[in-house]
Amino acid sequence: MTTIENPSTAASAAASGASATERFEHDKSPFAAVKDTPKERVDTLARELLSGIHDVVRRNHVTYDEYNALKAWLIQVGKDGEWPLFLDVWVEHVVEDVNTAHRKGNKGSIEGPYYVPDAPELGSTATVPMRDGESGDPLVWNGQITSTDGTPLAGKVELWHADADGFYSQFAPGIPEWNLRGSVTTNDDGSFTITTIRPAPYQIPTDGSCGKLIDAAGWHPWRPAHIHVKVSAPGHELLTAQLYFPGDPHNDDDVADAVKPDLVLDPQTNPDGGFTMRYDFVLDPAQS
Ligand code: MBD
Ligand code: FE
């Protein structure tokens, strides 16, 4: 068990890690999709991964103390429930890149550890569930889904994002279950209007194993403010993406390396202080 020194920070990091692990095991049936993977494929992937590690050991002459520190740290990542966090922050962006490189429409970005399926269904003019007086600047987003040939597509925009303090519902304590999460069904022409609040930059939990690595290596824990989406329409590839805000200091320096220029928004300031923006999605037809 992790020692809980400060109840409020321990609650956010330890609870976020554990819920992300539970969530993954519950939602993804992770082994079903690869149970028939040929031995040759497993052999190649496992051998090359191990040989990458061997190269690091040789090139850097890793000591026994360092090897044991690694062992202890890997054990602790599991105890903290931070494998989803670790993998999604430092590995997923490359998996995402190689799997969306063929797309002519939006290329997308990583899913990260905090997606929850079956969010409340909302109509094409939607206000995302939020608390009374939810803090953060109001954000009104108009957009449309089309196919790569320009055909409008009726579909869904699922979105989830952190609140103005950088916390996600269901992963930080004390936030209503579906806060700042929703599944928007577009009009027949693919158009939608979503009202939400502008999320804050996000700091990955620093009091668990991932935080220890960040500290020990002299890195920083920040992701730029972002809105996660999953955009879908019949006969088209599912787009998982994140949208970012211009001028965020971490757009060029994201701990999860998941920012792409095409995913940076262009919000306009309203006279009342909130923002209005337009962002459209282009989906690739499903490969047959
Ligand atoms: C996040 O909110 C996130 O999007 C990623 C990729 C990793 C950790 C937290
Ligand atoms: Fe996120």
Image (cartoon, rainbow, N blue to C red):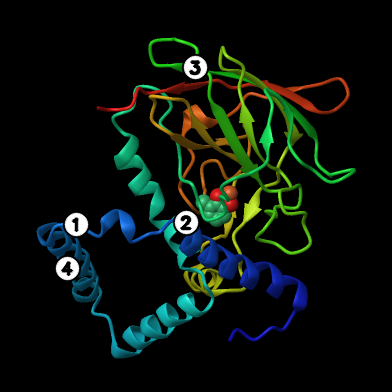
Q: Quadrant of the N terminus?
A: bottom right
- Residue at figure coordinates x 25%, y 60% from the top left: 35
User: In front: mark 1 or mark 4?
Assistant: 1
User: Considering only order in the chain, which callout, 2 or 4, is on the residue closer to the N terminus?
Assistant: 4
Tell me if the residue at label 4 has its CB under 8 Å from ligand 1: no
Q: Which mark is residue 179?
A: none
Give the crowd class for mark 2: few <14, some 14-19, many >=20 residues within 10 Å: many
Does the beta carbon at disc 1 come under 8 Å from ligand 1?
A: no
In the rendered image, residue 111, in percent from the top left (x then y), is placed at 48, 47
Circle 1 is placed at which residue position?
Answer: 37
The mark that comes first in sequence, 1 or 4, is: 1
In 3D space, how far apart are the residues under numbered discs 1 and 4 (Cα atoms)? 21 Å
First of labels 3, 1 by sequence position = 1
181 vs 244, nearest the viewer: 181
- Sequence-first tag of 4 and 3: 4
Q: Circle 3 sits on which residue? A: 153
The kind of residue tagged 2 is: Val
- The amino acid pointed to by label 3 is Leu
The Cα–Cα distance between marks 4 and 2, rounded to whole angstroms, is 22 Å
**Quadrant in which the C terminus is drawn:** top left
Q: CA distance from mark 3 to mark 1?
A: 34 Å
Q: Residues within 10 Å of mark 3 (few under 14, many from 20)?
A: many
The residue indicated by pointer 4 is: 51
Instruction: Judge whether residue 226 can be spotted in this image.
Output: no
Q: Residues within 10 Å of mark 1 (few under 14, many from 20)?
A: few
Distance between the alpha carbons at the discs numbered 4 and 3: 46 Å
* Residue with the mark numbered 2: 89
The front one of 2 and 28 is 28
Q: Amino acid at mark 1?
A: Thr
